[in-house]
Image (cartoon, rainbow, N blue to C red):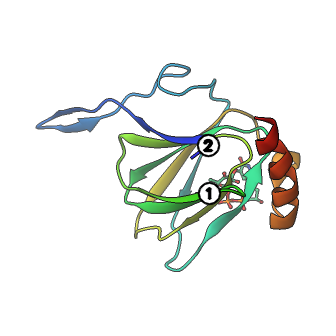
């Protein structure tokens, strides 16, 4: 889907466990300015329900699993993030919803910008209007 894709990270594994390195601008296609993580999400909870105008992010289920619905006015996709060596890149103007967080799951997010509420589009009708123009231009 436009502006979303999966990234495979390295996995150094041996009898002592697994190690996954992530290098700024090498494994991630932008300079990381912010990191946050989402934990202890109760069963049945759905989060997100927004798009970003400019922000790029990579979502990683470093523990457990979580489903991500990504959509734009023309297509939609559900990705089951369930591996710490897989990241989901989400670029600008992609609506996202996160749900089905498994018990104890940790969703790590690497972001290209500092937190800025004015970059969010939280109303779906506004999103449809703005994104129609956005996708017609690209
Ligand atoms: C996204 C998905 C995957 C901050 O103050 N700083 C931050 O860096 C973030 C991310 C959030 N906040 C505050 C804003 C809200 O008062 O934390 C509160 C919860 O944020 P929100 O309701 O936006 O959380 P989610 O899980 O719906 O969305 C988050 C990110 O906000 C968003 O950018 O793409 O995770």
Residue 69's spot in the image, x, y percent?
56, 61
Residue 82 appears at what percent x and percent y?
37, 55
In the picture, the quarter occupied by the C terminus is top right
Residue situated furthest top in the rendering = 26
Q: How crowded is mark 1: few (under 14 residues within 10 Å), some or many (20 or more)?
A: few
Q: Is residue 117 left or right of residue 75?
A: right
Determine whether, in the image, residue 11 is placed left or right of residue 2: left
Instruction: State the CA–CA distance, disc 2 to disc 1.
Output: 9 Å
The residue tagged 2 is 2
Q: Where is residue 90 in the image (x, y as percent from the top left)?
A: 61, 43
First of labels 2, 1 by sequence position: 2
Please give left or right for residue 138 compared with residue 21 in the image: right
Q: Is the residue 81 above or below the residue 112 in the image?
A: below
Mark 1 falls on what kind of element? loop
Q: Can residue 27 be seen in this view?
A: yes
Q: Is mark 2 on a helix, strand or loop?
A: loop
Q: Contact (CB < 8 A) between labels 2 and 1?
A: yes
Residue that appears at 54% across and 22% down: 24
What residue is rendered at 44% in x and 28% in y? 22
Q: Residue at horizontal 49%, vertical 78%? A: 43
Between 93 and 106, the one nearer to me in the picture: 93
The residue indicated by pointer 1 is 75
- Front residue of 84/134: it is 134
- Mark 1 within 8 Å of ligand 1, using the beta carbon: no
Label 2 beta carbon less than 8 Å to ligand 1: no
Pointer 2 local density, CA inside 10 Å: few below 14, some 14–19, many at least 20: some
- Residue 55 badge: none
Tell me where residue 35 sits by quadrant.
top right
């Amino acid at each position: 889907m436009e502006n979303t894709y999966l990234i495979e990270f390295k996995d150094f594994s041996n009898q002592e466990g697994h190690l996954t390195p992530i290098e700024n601008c090498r494994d991630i296609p932008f300079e990381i300015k912010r990191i946050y993580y989402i934990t202890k999400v109760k069963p049945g909870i759905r989060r997100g329900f927004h798009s970003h105008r400019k922000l790029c992010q990579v979502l990683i289920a470093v523990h457990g699993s979580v489903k991500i619905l990504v959509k734009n006015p023309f297509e939609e996709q559900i990705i089951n993030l369930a591996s710490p060596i897989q990241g989901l890149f989400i670029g600008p103007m992609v609506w996202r919803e996160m749900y089905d967080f498994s018990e104890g799951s940790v969703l790590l997010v690497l972001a290209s910008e500092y937190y800025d509420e004015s970059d969010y589009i939280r109303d779906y009708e506004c999103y449809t209007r703005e994104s129609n123009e956005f996708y017609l231009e690209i």
